[in-house]
Image (spheres, rainbow, N blue to C red):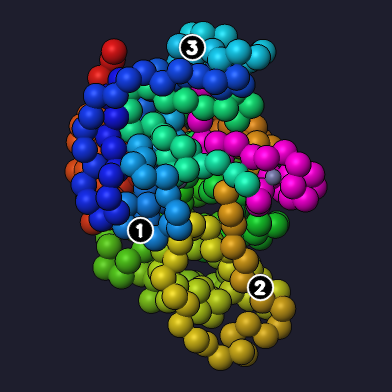
Amino acid sequence: MLGMVLHNIGKPLILEELPDPIPEPGQIRIRVEACGVCRTDLHLVDGELPNPKLPVIPGHEIVGRIDALGPDVADLSTGMRVGIPWLGSTCGICAYCASGQENLCDRPIFTGYTRDGGYATRAIADARYAFPLSEESNAAALAPLLCAGLIGWRSLRFTGNAKVLGLYGFGAAAHIVAQAARKQGRHIFAFTRPGDRASQDFALRLGAGWAGGSDEKPPEPLDAAIIYAPLGELVPLALASVRKGGSVVCAGVHMSDIPSFPYRSLWQERKIVSVANLTRQDGNEFLAFAAQNEIETRTKTYPLEQANRALADLRAGRFEGAAVLIPPRT
Ligand SMILES: [Zn+2]
Ligand SMILES: [Zn+2]
């Protein structure tokens, strides 16, 4: 198999030929058709996530076909198309797993972080954490649903029944969440880097009722805001635009420090919460919703060996929507 391998934090990924992995009991092996590039992968490369497995193959938005089954795998068969998300496995017995919060498991495995991921031609996954996917859809179009979509969906759920919703950072997650929220009858205001007309136009085309810079005030107070950009300075800005009782949901795995702000910005039962990882229930709910509601993704595809360029383009904001790697067919 071929994989793009991170050996050292802060260094480019290296294309390597590796032995095909052998699935262990309960595992499947996937021939990767497409793998999305997520901002979390940048945090991994930049050393902002603690204790990665090194060397590691990043990538946790995997779409592919099962090409080998380990012992004890029921319900799945070779040739099936599946999606492999960030949550690679959980212990099943800790207090969080036992109470329906497997996203907070004490001993989780994360795809492309503590287990090799999908920047590769083959990947190993836990059969219980693989989502069956549509056979017809384009693989690249499906890939961003597996993290930007799933965690976006969880963050949207955290806004309760907010009617007027602000999205801070209009990248892969927001472009999916905006469509889902519009289908639910919510109003979207999109906040981008100040002066980023291209992203603002993109948001307006996807149904946002207003788009502006993150330094601007929305045309009316927000019932809730979701922050996708990894910038702590957005928290007090979002809080200042949220009405009494509203929430600010921080959806990223990493964020720069949040500057101090006056208590009166939080007063009146405003809330700040973070969203961590996903549960399989989030995945099943969202993938069904996306299929029924024709959620479309905007992707820019790169050959697998150009993963470093895809990461650099994501960092620089050089495309709208999501980057997706396409490995050679082997
Ligand atoms: Zn657990
Ligand atoms: Zn992700």
Is-magenta flag for residue 159?
Answer: no
At 67% from the left and 85% from the top, the residue drawn is 267
Q: Is residue 13 left or right of residue 163?
A: left
Separation of disc 1 and disc 3 at Cα?
A: 33 Å
- Precedes in sequence: disc 1 or disc 2: 1
Instruction: Say whether marks 1 and 3 touch (CB < 8 Å).
Output: no
Question: Relative to 3, is 262 above or below?
Answer: below
Q: Residues within 10 Å of mark 1 (few under 14, many from 20)?
A: some
Q: Residue at x 27, y 62 (%)?
A: 196
Q: Is residue 31 above or below residue 217?
A: above
Q: Is residue 167 above or below residue 53?
A: below
For mark 3, give the secondary structure.
strand
Give the mark, 3 or 2, whose residue is nearer the N terminus.
Answer: 3
Q: Is residue 89 magenta?
A: yes
Task: Magenta stretch: give its range.
Answer: 82-106
Query: Looking at the rendered structure, which numbered label has been put on residue 68?
Result: 3
The residue carrying mark 2 is 271
Question: Which quadrant is the N terminus positioned in?
Answer: top left
For label 2, count other residues whose C-alpha is less than 10 Å away and answer few (under 14), some (14-19) or many (20+): some
Amino acid type at mark 3: Ala
Q: Can residue 243 be seen here? A: yes
Q: Which residue is mark 1?
A: 47
Does residue 297 sit above or below 54 in this rendering?
above
Disc number lying in front (3 or 2)? 3
Q: Earlier in the sequence, mark 1 or mark 3?
A: 1
Whole-percent x, y for residue 75 in the image: 66, 13
**Residue at horizontal 45%, vertical 18%?**
22
